[in-house]
Image (spheres, rainbow, N blue to C red):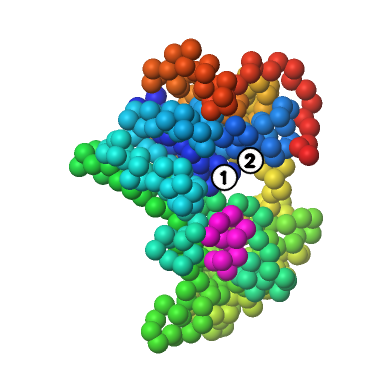
Amino acid sequence: MGGPLDGIRILDLTSVLVGPYATQILGDLGADVIKVEPPAGDNVRGIGPMRHPGMGAIFLHANRSKRSLVLDLKQPAARQALLDLVPTADVFIHNMRPRAMARLGLAPEDVTALNPKLVYAAITGFGQDGPYADKPAYDDLIQGAVALPSLIAEATGSDPRYVPATLADRTAGLHAVYAVTAALLQRARTGRGEVVEIPMFEALTEFVLGDHMGGETFVPPLGPTGYPRLLAAHRRPYRTLDGYICTVIYNDKQWRHFLGLIGRAELLTCDPRFADIGARTRHINELYGMVADAMATRTTADWLAALAAAEIPAMPLHTPGSLIEDPHHAATGFLPLTEHPSEGTMRAIGIATRWAGARPKVRRHAPRLGEHSAEVLAEVGYDDARLAALCACGAVVVAADTPTDITEPMESA
């Protein structure tokens, strides 16, 4: 299976994570993704651990299914090489500030003039019609701007802190995936290209306020912001006699079964806190406190067995290390060992979706810096002499031979 996006070519000028995560998914689905990097490479290449410079772990997990083309776009010859590729492309995507793209002569009007059927996708920090249009955006900044640290502080009684995952980058990246694929579908129907903007701030505002708009949904307000269940202090993994367990007791049936397990079945009918989901939501912290007290009386294994028998959803609490060893992933092969041509044996992360019962095949390893520069430019008519001239002036960089000295992992400085 070539993948549902087989035959689609993407010029990928994204860096760090929000864009590379999106384009890796598009590449996994079959698109020919040409990752255009500056001579220093994507910054994430330098984040260790790594076996060779420029091939850090995070980079490897966000840049497979791509070819690397190195162009110094500040040089006219390199910019021209990129523009020579535009007529062959279906998608042009970047996550630079639009003003910077305009300075490079790569604004939407500059690029689409060469290919009116092109989907031009810009992942921005903020919508370009607002006062934050030119602000820089990173995951931590967007998390703070959409109140995630404040919500954590309210729920835990601690100081505000960021979610310890690149939640904003990856969420906005998923918005970019569906926006690009929808634009390609529209083009197939109309024959016209499209300019698409994916602002991180707006994407994450929707993500957060979908849960927490609360009473402010209505005018005048019917109450404060916040979804009480998500903000309950006791909404956390529950301590057992020998560890922790995660469970969600949500509907009437699940509460009836749980109260039966702890010998308090009468509460469902005699305690108004249990009358319906609205009452339970208003008193959720009290109820979750009751669950916490009960969980502390038995082992994790005992509770997993009892909750499964009672048809109450539950999972053990993983660490990142134990997640890698989860038996479900072992059975499905989601975290396979693979052989990278320069980095040796490594553990990959699988493609989550299945098509006709099978995952799309990963066709390309994460590339070394400039690994495909010569190959890509040859496809638009650059001969050896022209390529050599571009390399001589630093406009293009071609990777050195594949390293063979696989060594023990090292941390980056």
Q: Position of residue 135 (x, y in %)?
A: 53, 60
> Where is the N terminus found, in terms of image quarters?
top left
Say which quarter of the image contains residue 31.
Answer: top left
Give the numbered dot on residue 43: 2
Q: Identify which residue, 180 or 255, lies in the foreground.
A: 180
Mark toward the viewer: 2 or 1: 2
Q: Earlier in the sequence, mark 2 or mark 1?
A: 1
Tag 1 secondary structure: loop
Q: Position of residue 69 (x, y in %)?
A: 51, 27
What residue is drawn where x is 61% and y is 34%?
41
Residue sitting farthest toward the left? 190
**Magenta stretch contains residue 81:** no
Residue sitting farthest toward the top? 384
The residue under label 1 is: 17
Give the amino acid at mark 2. Answer: Asn
268 w.r.t. 295: above or below: below
Give the amino acid at mark 1. Answer: Leu
Tag 2 secondary structure: helix
What residue is drawn where x is 37% and y is 37%?
91
Separation of disc 2 and disc 1 at Cα? 10 Å
> Where is the C terminus found, in terms of image quarters?
top right
Disc 2 crowd rating (10 Å Cα; few below 14, some 14-19, many 20+) is some
Q: Is residue 265 visible?
A: no
Q: Is residue 131 left or right of residue 339?
A: left
What residue is drawn where x is 66% and y is 21%?
342
Q: What residue span does the magenta drawing correspond to?
A: 135-147
**Magenta stretch contains residue 142:** yes
